[in-house]
């Protein structure tokens, strides 16, 4: 394996090592002040009040969570294991109230994998799908929810009100909206990473049509701050609008790539013409990757609504657009219409539209 931190290289079968010289630097708006504060790394967390008792917590690992003080106990939202007990330290730095309620945003371990630290007596609220998945794949560090809901629920503790809502699968089934209406703080995890293009492959999301739609659903809320789960920054409305524009551009570029390279049999067969039957999957890889490269290049070179290109507006644009392009191209082929279908036989126009 080599030394810790060494890149594991396997040649053409694997991924090549990325070089900083090949990528655009992160824009300044991506870098909050606490990233330059040594105390952030010494403590292992940064906590900030977003509005009347609702706090955001982040960690050097790039994971975010939230909590609300109520006068009758703390409501914790999530428990990322890379934040871990520093979440408790953040709460204790603000209040002496015990944690009485925990809300799971969704079932993924990277966001709730330390939930057992809250103890056995807390009430755990989550969507019913989240409970079903945790029961199916048990984890002692992610205790089962004690209370579930299907569509909408209101949690009121000490007069502090949180509105919970499920609008369908996006990042994963059971991923909910958690809204504090008086404080105008929204928690929606793994959709928007403020100031960034998000983690690779649309944040490893399962339903890309739903994930793209979630940007619009977030904007239906009246919020001043968004807890997005990642990037060591809370988000603003403008962050969501910018992320939506980026992914709309990527979707448009993916649609063009598919139309250019998948709309006729002749277009696809160009990738197989020189290959023997036992190497046909090499042609498939080149076909998919060519569409991805087209969408990536088109997106990164587009002059956007503010006159800048995406590498100037969002961190990670030159790093992860290719991954997002792959996901959007494949999701478009799987989740959207093919605009027709193969006629009988091999000759003539391919699709009936």
Image (tube, grey):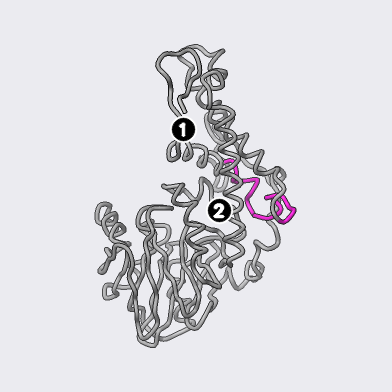
Q: Which range is magenta? A: 306-322
Q: Measured along the vertical axis of the image, is residue 251 above or below residue 62?
A: above
Marking on residue 285:
none
Is 166 on the left-hand or right-hand side of 293? left
Q: Which residue: 68% across, 55% down?
A: 313
Marking on residue 338:
1
Is 55 on the left-hand or right-hand side of 316? left
Q: Measured along the vertical axis of the image, is residue 345 above or below residue 211?
A: above
The picture places residue 267, in percent across and down from the top left corner, at 56, 21
Q: Which residue: 75% across, 53% down?
A: 307
Q: Which residue: 66% across, 70% down?
A: 33
* Circle 1 crowding by C-alpha within 10 Å: few under 14, some 14–19, many from 20: some
The picture places residue 283, in percent across and down from the top left corner, at 52, 21
Q: Quadrant of residue 99?
A: bottom left
User: 6 or 309: which is nearer to us?
Assistant: 309
Residue marked by disc 2? 198
The picture places residue 165, in percent across and down from the top left corner, at 37, 65
Mark 2 falls on what kind of element? loop
């Amino acid at each position: 394996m080599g030394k810790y931190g060494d890149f594991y290289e396997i040649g053409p079968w694997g991924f090549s090592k990325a070089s900083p010289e090949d990528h655009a630097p992160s824009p300044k708006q991506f870098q909050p002040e606490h990233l330059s504060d040594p105390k952030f790394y010494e403590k292992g967390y940064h906590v900030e009040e977003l509005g009347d008792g609702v706090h955001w917590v982040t960690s050097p690992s790039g994971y975010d969570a939230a909590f609300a003080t109520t006068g009758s106990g703390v409501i914790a939202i999530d428990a990322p294991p890379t934040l871990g007990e520093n979440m408790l330290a953040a709460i204790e730095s603000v209040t002496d109230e015990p944690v009485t309620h925990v809300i799971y945003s969704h079932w993924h371990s990277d966001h709730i994998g330390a939930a057992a630290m809250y103890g056995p007596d807390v009430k755990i609220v989550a969507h019913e799908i989240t409970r079903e998945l945790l029961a199916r794949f048990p984890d002692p560090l992610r205790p089962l929810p004690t209370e579930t809901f299907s569509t909408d629920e209101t949690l009121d503790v000490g007069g502090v009100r949180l509105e919970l809502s499920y609008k369908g699968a996006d990042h994963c089934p059971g991923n909910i909206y958690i809204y504090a209406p008086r404080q105008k703080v929204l928690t929606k995890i793994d959709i928007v990473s403020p100031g960034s293009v998000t983690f690779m492959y649309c944040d490893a999301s399962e339903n890309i049509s739903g994930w793209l739609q979630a940007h619009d659903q977030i904007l239906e809320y009246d919020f001043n701050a968004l807890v997005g789960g990642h990037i060591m920054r809370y988000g603003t409305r403008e962050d969501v609008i910018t992320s939506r524009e980026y992914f709309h551009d990527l979707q448009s570029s993916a649609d063009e790539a598919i139309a250019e390279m998948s709309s006729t049999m002749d277009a696809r067969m160009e990738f197989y013409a020189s290959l023997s039957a036992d190497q046909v999957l090499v042609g498939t890889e080149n076909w998919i990757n060519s569409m991805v490269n087209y969408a990536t290049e088109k997106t990164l070179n587009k002059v956007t609504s503010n006159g800048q290109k995406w590498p100037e507006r969002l961190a990670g644009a030159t790093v992860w657009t290719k991954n997002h392009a792959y996901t959007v191209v494949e999701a478009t082929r799987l989740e959207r219409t093919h605009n027709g279908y193969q006629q009988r036989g091999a000759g003539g126009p391919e699709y009936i539209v």
